[in-house]
Amino acid sequence: MIPINLPKIGEEEVQAVVKVLRSGMLTSGLGAGPQVTEFEKNFADFAGAKHAVAVNTGTAALHSAVLAVGVKQGDEVILPSFTFVATAEAVVLAGAKPVFADIDPQTYNLSPSAVEKAVTKKTKAIMPVDLYGFSADMKPLKEIAAKRGLALVEDAAQAHGTTYSGKPAGAFADAACWSLYASKNMTTGEGGVTTTNNDQIAETLRMIRTHGEKAKYSSLMLGTNYRMSEIQAAIGNVQLQKLPSFVAKRRQNAQQLTKILEKNSKLVLPYESKDRLHSWYLYTAKLKDGTEEERNHIVEKLKKKGVGAEVYYINPVHQMPFYRENFGSAKLPETEKASKQVFSLPIHPGVTEEQARFIGETVLSLL
């Protein structure tokens, strides 16, 4: 089976972990050990940001960022439903209400026009998602946020290597949240990081991750334990050096798949433009005019032939029982249509040229 994603770990990561184990310093009480501090500096440089605050998961990064921009109980946050549940989860954990807005059918990302219609007096923030590794349309979203006095928190969990108007993902947001989960373009196993150019947000993020403390045993605000370990950070420092080659290989595999699949008019292939470059976290095609049953049949057949195709996301968040029961129904036609027609194919760095050809030709034969 060619898996949908696979972490690429080498001897360098192994040795980095061994070095931490031998040092005896596995973590830091305030979350800022030497490996974490180095990782934060390196990640900030990579993201073109003033600050990077490392935490133990991407969900922790999202939750911390929502809190740090001032979202409180009773507030509303506008976000897509076509995303991993953690985006909405972070809003609910902050005591706020997730308000789901529809997507642009071409990019699968939050539609700025849908956001405008969803703003109310209770709206505190907008949370776009860089889905599949392709940036949300940040300039119009930033204009809406500035005009309405709203915070802009970007879910960049899948966007390592993405650019928008020549800048890395996150550059147009008040805070951007990245996941370092094992499937992502780079990994620390579990892990996350928030980038920001705002000094106050960065200071608040650092307190949130370690029980609201600036100094030990002196909490200044309500916080939690979201610290990244020294082992995670050591892996991250190595992975960050390899990230450009990982993204280049993903792009190469994506281009090869596109050359094969563009022969069939039944598919809508991933969108990319000169001013919005993909990180190719996932290669997501859409079965044009196809039914959910037809799409599911193709995915099932691909798996039987050894291609680990998956559907992201088969259940939009607004249709999940918890969110439907607690926050009501929403009419999101483009979101619901996409969830019935999209499917993703493996293009991670472990996919060889021969395997990419096999994946593409297998999809064509099934169509």
Image (cartoon, rainbow, N blue to C red):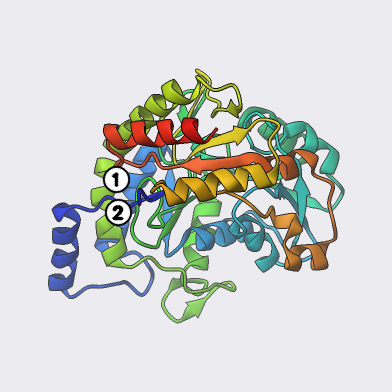
- Asked if labels 2 and 1 touch by Cβ distance under 8 angstroms, the answer is yes
Where is mark 1, residue-wise? 240
Apparent side of residue 154 relative to residue 207 in the rendered image (left or right): right
Q: Residue at x 58, y 28 (%)?
A: 267
Q: Residue at x 60, y 34 (%)?
A: 286
Binning the other alpha carbons within 10 Å of mark 1 as few (below 14), some (14 to 19) or many (20 upward) gives many
Is residue 56 or residue 345 the one in the foreground? 345
Is residue 18 or residue 27 the one in the foreground? 18
Q: Residue at x 28, y 66 (%)?
A: 230
Three-letter residue code for mark 1: Leu
Q: Residue at x 70, y 50 (%)?
A: 81
Residue 321 picture location, percent across and down: 75, 66
Apparent side of residue 122 relative to residue 250 in the rendered image (left or right): right
Residue 89 picture location, percent across and down: 64, 63
Where is mark 2, residue-wise? 236
Q: Is residue 266 above or below residue 185?
A: above
Name the secondary structure under disc 2.
helix
Three-letter residue code for mark 2: Gly
Kindly tell me whether residue 136 is visible in this rendering: no
Q: Is residue 84 above or below residue 168?
A: below
How many numbered dots are placed on residues in this image?
A: 2
Is residue 236 or residue 46 the one in the foreground? 236
Residue 319 picture location, percent across and down: 75, 57
Query: How far apart are labels 1 and 2 at the CA level?
Result: 6 Å
Binning the other alpha carbons within 10 Å of mark 2 as few (below 14), some (14 to 19) or many (20 upward) gives many
Q: Is residue 354 above or below residue 242?
A: above
* Residue at the far front in the pictured view: 365
Residue 116 picture location, percent across and down: 81, 36
Name the secondary structure under disc 1.
helix
Kindly tell me whether residue 311 is visible in this rendering: yes
